[in-house]
Amino acid sequence: MPTSLVTGAAGFIGSHIVDSLIAQGHHVVALDDLSGGFVDNVNPQAIFIEASCTDHVKLARLFNEYKFDYVFHLAAYAAEGLSHFIKRFNYTNNVIGSVNLINEAVKHDVKRFIFTSSIAVYGRNQLPMREELVPQPEDSYGIAKYAVEMELKASHEMFGLDYVIFRPHNVYGERQNTGDKYRNVIGIFMNQILAREPLTLFGDGEQKRAFSYIADVAPIIAKSATLDTAKNEVFNVGADTVYTVNQLAYAVMEAMGSKAPLKYLPARNEVVNAWSDHLKVQKIFGAPKEVALAEGLKRMGDWVKSAGVRLSKPFEGIEIEKNLPLSWKVQVGN
């Protein structure tokens, strides 16, 4: 039975990866610092350990104890827009934490390191975003993700560490932290509906995205550990159908069975249109039928209504306040 470490395992995507790996017969150690995840997300068949990837001493002990065959690294603070204003926090968590894991993976001859990056690495490249494009990230989160991608490639060339890199985008579904005010627009909309608040949109709401249901993403990532044709490759993964944020808002209302007014906030400095091509991942992993947005939103909405309103603390420790969106200034108490 292979032994796998999953970081960010109490979070949204990570907890679904844990489920998929257990279904495949893996012995799973689930690591999370619970900064954005919840213990009840973790499959009880996994061994749960509360710790941060930034704690290199704790990581060394874990690798010595469990002799991991595979590492699935999903732990990250993934607020793209906010990352501009929390640079030190962003790079400590998303780069240094990743490097700590890579160091241990090299030292303990891990068979494969699977990393969830993001299409944030592409920046404002041509659409659809394809793996062969040269990344040009425009926010600190995307820069951090691309730095880890490059470090994995360097570690493969220097030490023979095999890897798989995935660039998912706008993933949604059950167990998403809907209480997070800075990321996950679908979760934010659903939480606002439950709280009987207006749905808040930045700019005119005509930004275009493809929204990816978790069941279309997690099994592919889990399968990559033992698929030879995936080794040392980079894959976009997610949905193909594109929607505006305005269209999404009305689709969420439909799924939740409740209407809400739209409140337009000043536009943020962000990539306006972002979706990716998935021919490469479909060639290697097969082409599963995409869960339609309406169906995925209904499944998530049913879960959200049963879970109730999620509350999370405002982010404390803003490092740069200059040009911070006004709505976030209110949220962080400034």
Image: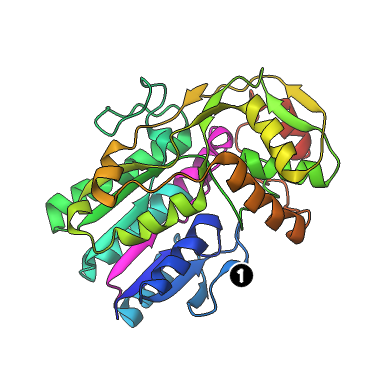
| Residue 26, above or below 282 | below
Q: Is residue 77 visible?
A: yes
Boundaries of the magenta span:
68-92
Query: Count of labels shown?
Result: 1
Return the residue nearer the eye: 34 or 196. Answer: 196
Residue 317 spot, x, y in % from top left: 64, 44
* Residue lying at 61% horizontally and 70% vertically, measured from the top left: 39
* Residue lying at 53% horizontally and 24% vertically, measured from the top left: 208
**Image quadrant containing the N terminus:** bottom left
The amino acid sitting under disc 1 is Val
Q: Is residue 145 left or right of residue 189?
A: left
Q: Is residue 111 left or right of residue 45?
A: left
Residue 128 spot, x, y in % from top left: 37, 25
The residue where tag 1 is placed is: 39
* Residue lying at 64% horizontally and 41% vertically, measured from the top left: 186
| Residue 83, above or below 112 | above
Q: Is residue 246 left or right of residue 81?
A: right
- Location of residue 265 by image quarter: top right
Looking at the rendered structure, the secondary structure element under dot 1 is helix
* Residue lying at 66% horizontally and 19% vertically, measured from the top left: 203
Residue 233 spot, x, y in % from top left: 22, 46
Q: Is residue 150 visible?
A: no
Label 1 crowd bin: few (<14), some (14–19), many (20+), radius 10 Å: some
- Location of residue 207 by image quarter: top right
Asked if the magenta segment contains residue 147, the reply would be no
Q: How is the image coloured?
A: rainbow
Q: Name the outermost residue toward the right.
A: 196
**Image quadrant containing the C terminus:** top right
Return the residue nearer the eye: 263 or 296. Answer: 296
Residue 264 spot, x, y in % from top left: 74, 22
